[in-house]
């Protein structure tokens, strides 16, 4: 559906209908992440996570956005351990102690939603726990910087400063 575009200070303001569409897409992504997170157990192949994501997304009237986007061959990103992001599911079998990030992006009725979560596969070591703790703290620092008239660079700055203060760095790409 075509919407009249309202722009305020260079920002497109969404209509109530658009906001509702985005919310529904986000709810689907949240449910998908919950389902896939329940699969994160030793012995599960990452390709199986992809298959379930693909089927669940289609069964709920949506399209898996990563599939064929710039040549990406799968419906979900599954990044294990040192794979920072956009891992391609395949024949890797999850093991006890793995850190597993699942990144779900869906298109529902033309609206995109994208979210990810890092799951522990079984028991993880203290180094992995600290990494996820600092990552979450950094996310919160970034969210605290989201307010009118603030710049995106300020959000990134707060995230980077917190990570560095805790002995980590931010991946740049």
Image (spheres, grey):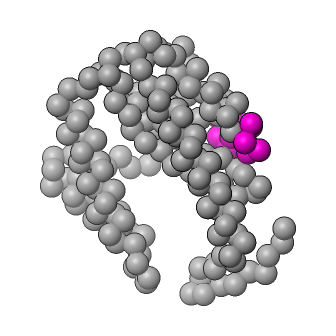
Residue 31 versus residue 146 in the image, above or below: above
Q: In this view, does 145 lie to the left or right of 111?
A: left
Instruction: Examine the structure image and report whether residue 94 is included in the region drawn in magenta.
Output: no
Instruction: Examine the structure image and report whether residue 71 is included in the region drawn in magenta.
Output: yes
x 70%, y 30%: residue: 55
Q: Residue 156 versus residue 95: which sits nearer the camera?
A: 95
> How many marks overall?
0
x 47%, y 33%: residue: 37
Instruction: Work out which quarter of the rendered image holds the N terminus and state it.
Output: bottom right
Q: In this view, does 27 lie to the left or right of 67?
A: left
Q: Can I make out residue 149 in this image?
A: yes
**What segment is highlighted magenta in the picture?**
58-72
Residue 138 versus residue 65 in the image, above or below: below
Q: Residue 83 versus residue 56: which sits nearer the camera?
A: 56
Q: Is residue 78 left or right of residue 70?
A: left
Residue 150 versus residue 141 in the image, above or below: below
Residue 99 versus residue 91 in the image, above or below: below
Instruction: Name the image quarter holding residue 157.
Output: bottom left
**Residue 11 picture location, percent across and down:** 59, 79
**Residue 110 picture location, percent across and down:** 76, 57
**Residue 7 picture location, percent across and down:** 65, 84
Q: In this view, does 140 lie to the left or right of 79?
A: left
**Residue 139 picture location, percent across and down:** 33, 56
x 69%, y 63%: residue: 21
x 74%, y 36%: residue: 59
Q: Can I make out residue 70 in this image?
A: no
Q: Residue furthest right?
A: 1
């Amino acid at each position: 559906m075509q919407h009249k575009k309202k722009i305020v200070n260079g920002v497109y303001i969404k209509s109530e209908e658009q906001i509702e569409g985005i919310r529904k897409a986000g709810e689907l992504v949240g449910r998908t992440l919950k389902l896939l997170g329940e699969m994160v157990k030793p012995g599960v192949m990452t390709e199986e996570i992809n298959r379930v994501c693909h089927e669940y997304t289609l069964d709920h009237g949506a399209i898996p956005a990563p599939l064929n986007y710039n040549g990406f061959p799968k419906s979900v990103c599954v990044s294990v351990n040192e794979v920072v992001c956009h891992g391609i599911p395949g024949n890797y079998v999850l093991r006890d102690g793995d850190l597993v990030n699942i990144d779900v992006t869906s298109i529902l009725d033309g609206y995109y939603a994208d979210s990810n979560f890092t799951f522990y596969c079984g028991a993880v070591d203290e180094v992995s726990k600290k990494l996820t703790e600092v990552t979450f703290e950094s996310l919160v620092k970034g969210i605290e910087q989201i307010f009118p008239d603030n710049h995106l660079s300020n959000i990134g700055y707060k995230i980077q400063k917190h990570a560095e203060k805790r002995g980590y760095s931010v991946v740049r790409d």
